[in-house]
Image (cartoon, rainbow, N blue to C red):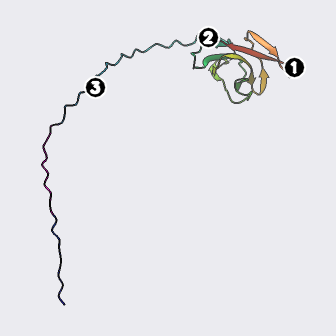
Amino acid sequence: MLMMKITKKSKKTLVDVEAVAPEPVKPAPIKPALPVVAQPVKPAAHTLAQPVAAKPDSQQPARVALQLVEPAAKQVYVAGSFNGWKPDSTPLVPLGNGRWKGDLKLGPGRHEYLFVVDGHWRPDPSAKESVQNPFGGRNSVLTVSE
């Protein structure tokens, strides 16, 4: 048996193509960068056993330093309205010679707090303000301005 292959010739169409040079691209104007100037950060001044609130930025909480002198203490914490009154969530660190310090970040407003010294709740002896609490004692008050 004889097999034949049938092919069709296609007509080719020729098209004239002209080479065109691309238009030059204009570079975007470059804006000079502004110089970056470092601003010094002033630490909040504080005195022994006095809460001090630094003025907060509009979006940053204030840094507050609390100090307590309690020479016999083994552990000191601060509990208050700012941490849900959890007695072990905010420890103070010993500085030596019976001095303890805690740094807090607080938003503007009025904050009540107590120190927890070896499990015993105590008001801050250097607090400028205190209020009666529902347990027969007094809570120390710290106000952070806006």
Can residue 13 be found in the magenta stretch?
yes
Mark sitting earlier along the chain (2/1): 2
Q: CA distance from mark 2 to mark 1?
A: 30 Å
Magenta stretch?
Answer: 11-21
Instruction: Name the residue that disc number 3 marks.
Output: 28
Q: Secondary structure at mark 2?
A: loop
Marks 3 and 1, how far apart at CA? 72 Å
Which residue is at the far right?
136
> Going by the image, does 43 lie left or right of 125?
left
Counting other residues with Cα less than 10 Å from the Cα at mark 2, is it few (<14), some (14-19), or many (20 or more)?
some
Q: Earlier in the sequence, mark 2 or mark 3?
A: 3
What is the quadrant of the N terminus in the image? bottom left
What residue does disc 2 label? Answer: 46
Q: Is residue 31 magenta?
A: no
Quadrant location, the C terminus: top right
Residue 52 place in picture, x, y as percent: 64, 12
Residue 140: percent from left, percent from top: 76, 16
CA–CA distance between discs 2 and 3? 53 Å
Residue at image coords 73%, 23%: 81
